[in-house]
């Protein structure tokens, strides 16, 4: 059954992701995990109705709604905010006043209490007015490979969290009158 294979694949992916994060994923499984990560990311980008073009500024990575503390160095000073969404290629955040589209700004993302901030530069690509604030969208222009990898891991943490919720919801709930499922 196709649904069963997909459910198994998603469950296996989340298990591999947990092992990747903890450093226990075997080197023989790492290429399969990285390919599955790329495949799942591409599928989710398509599901988000985003374009998979390269080199022209189009979004190329799956984004997730996550509130991550971020600080920008803007022309009018520092602006602290939380991301509205984030991907390995950019983010959006609410700011009081959005700088002009095309502006380069330094940023610092804090992905955890004990983790060093990820610093870099981003380019403002859109400003969307929202009730006294501006939702500023930016693409990463200068960011370390390690920083991008940490963000991508955060994105896949969020994806696996949603997959686990979905998989729990799809499991039939046994009622007192229902017989137990057969043993394997």
Image (spheres, rainbow, N blue to C red):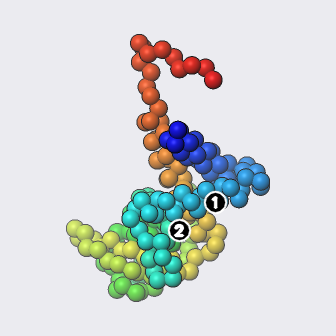
Q: Secondary structure at mark 2?
A: loop
- State the image coordinates of residue 178 (x, y, percent, origin top left): 44, 16
State the residue at coordinates (48%, 79%).
122
Indicate whether 163 appears above or below 183.
below
Q: Nearer the viewer, residue 41 or 133?
A: 41
State the residue at coordinates (35%, 78%).
126
Indicate whether 145 appears above or below 38.
below
Q: CA distance from mark 2 to mark 1?
A: 16 Å
State the residue at coordinates (64%, 60%).
35
Residue 13 can be seen in this image: yes
Residue 111 can be seen in this image: no
Relative to 51, is 55 on the left or the right? right
> Dot 1 corresponds to which residue?
35
Within 10 Å of the Cα at label 2, are there few (<14), some (14-19), or many (20+) other Cα atoms? many
> Dot 2 corresponds to which residue?
88
Q: Earlier in the sequence, mark 2 or mark 1?
A: 1
Q: Secondary structure at mark 1?
A: helix
Q: Nearer the viewer, residue 25 or 56?
A: 56
Q: Nearer the viewer, residue 167 or 39?
A: 39
- State the image coordinates of residue 109 (x, y, percent, origin top left): 51, 68
- State the image coordinates of residue 7 (x, y, percent, origin top left): 53, 42
Q: Quadrant of the C terminus?
A: top right
Q: Which mark is residue 162?
A: none
Indicate whether 61 appears above or below 7.
below
Can you tell which of label 2 and label 1 is closer to the viewer? 1
Q: Residue furthest front?
A: 1
Q: Residue furthest left?
A: 131
State the residue at coordinates (38%, 65%).
49
């Amino acid at each position: 059954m196709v649904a069963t294979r997909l459910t198994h694949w998603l469950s296996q992916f989340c298990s591999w992701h947990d092992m990747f994060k903890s450093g226990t994923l075997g080197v023989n499984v790492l290429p399969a995990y990285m390919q599955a990560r790329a495949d799942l990311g591409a599928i989710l980008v398509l599901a988000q109705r985003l374009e998979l073009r390269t080199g022209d500024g189009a979004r190329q990575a799956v984004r997730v709604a996550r509130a991550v503390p971020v600080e920008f160095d803007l022309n009018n000073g520092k602006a602290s905010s939380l991301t509205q969404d984030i991907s390995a290629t950019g983010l959006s955040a609410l700011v009081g006043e959005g700088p002009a589209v095309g502006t380069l700004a330094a940023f610092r993302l804090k992905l955890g209490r004990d983790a060093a901030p990820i610093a870099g530069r981003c380019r403002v690509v859109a400003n969307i007015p929202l009730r006294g604030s501006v939702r500023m969208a930016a693409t990463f222009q200068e960011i370390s490979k390690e920083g991008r990898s940490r963000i991508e891991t955060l994105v896949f943490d969020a994806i696996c969290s949603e997959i686990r919720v979905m998989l729990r919801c799809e499991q039939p709930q046994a009622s007192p009158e229902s017989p137990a499922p057969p043993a394997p």
